[in-house]
Amino acid sequence: MKGFSFPLESIRVLRQQRERAAQQRYSRSLMQRDTAEHVLKVAGDELTAGYQLLGGEMEHGAGAGRIIHLRTWCNVLEMRFHECEAALAEARNAASEAFNFMCAARRDRETLDRFHEKSRATWQRSCQQAEQKMLDELAVQRQSAPALEHNRIH
């Protein structure tokens, strides 16, 4: 009997490649999310430092020009912080989408893998049945061979 051949093997390979690509995409999206979280933390720390500096200057009676300058700087830091928050939200959404795509790719591959295994099991059962049939036929031939030989002698 010929070896097992899965007719959908090329699709199976493509699904495995698609799953690997989805895993890599998800990994990259997690790194981008982590980077965005770090950038947001740095922006938050800078904003906190800016407000602390502004508060300290106001306590020590700094001039109006200096206060306006520091307040403007804090506004810039706030805008940067909000941009970082938006970037982090976008990175989280991208990671979520990549995760969902990866899960779908895995499900698709697993479905085809199960079909592959069922097909292989069916083929193996068929091979075993054919082998058993051949062994049964050989056994019948062996049992009838001595009787034929005995009849030839007499």
Image (spheres, grey):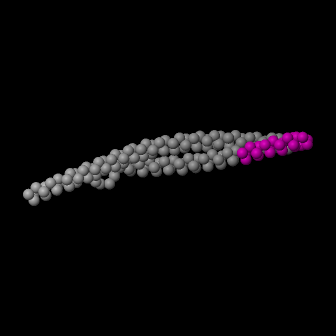
Residue 154, percent across and down? Answer: 8, 57
Quadrant of the image occupied by residue 37: top right
Query: Does any portion of residue 19 appear in the rendered image?
Result: yes
The residue at the far front in this view is: 154
Residue at x 42% of width, y 44% of height? 114
Check residue 51 for magenta coloring.
yes
Residue 118 or 5: which is nearer the viewer? 118
| Residue drawn 58% across the image and 49% down it | 28
Magenta-colored stretch includes residue 154: no
* Residue 76 in view, yes or no: no
Direction right: furthest residue: 61
Q: Quadrant of residue 87?
A: top right
**Where 120 sits versus 152, above or below?**
above
Q: Which residue is at a point 51% across and 44% down the rendered structure image?
A: 102
Q: Horizontal and vertical percent for residue 21?
A: 50, 50
Residue numbers of the magenta segment: 41-64
Label tally: 0
Q: Nearer the viewer, residue 96 or 69?
A: 96
Q: Quadrant of residue 47?
A: top right
In the rendered image, the residue lying farthest to the left is: 154
The N terminus: image quadrant: bottom left
Q: Position of residue 38 (x, y in %)?
A: 69, 47
| 124 with respect to 39 (left or right) | left
Which residue: 47% across, 48% down? 18
Q: Nearer the viewer, residue 81 or 30?
A: 30
Q: Overall secondary structure of the magenta stretch?
A: helix
Coordinates of residue 66 in the picture (x, y in percent): 85, 44
90 vs 138, left or right, is: right
Instruction: State the residue in front, 66 or 103.
Output: 103
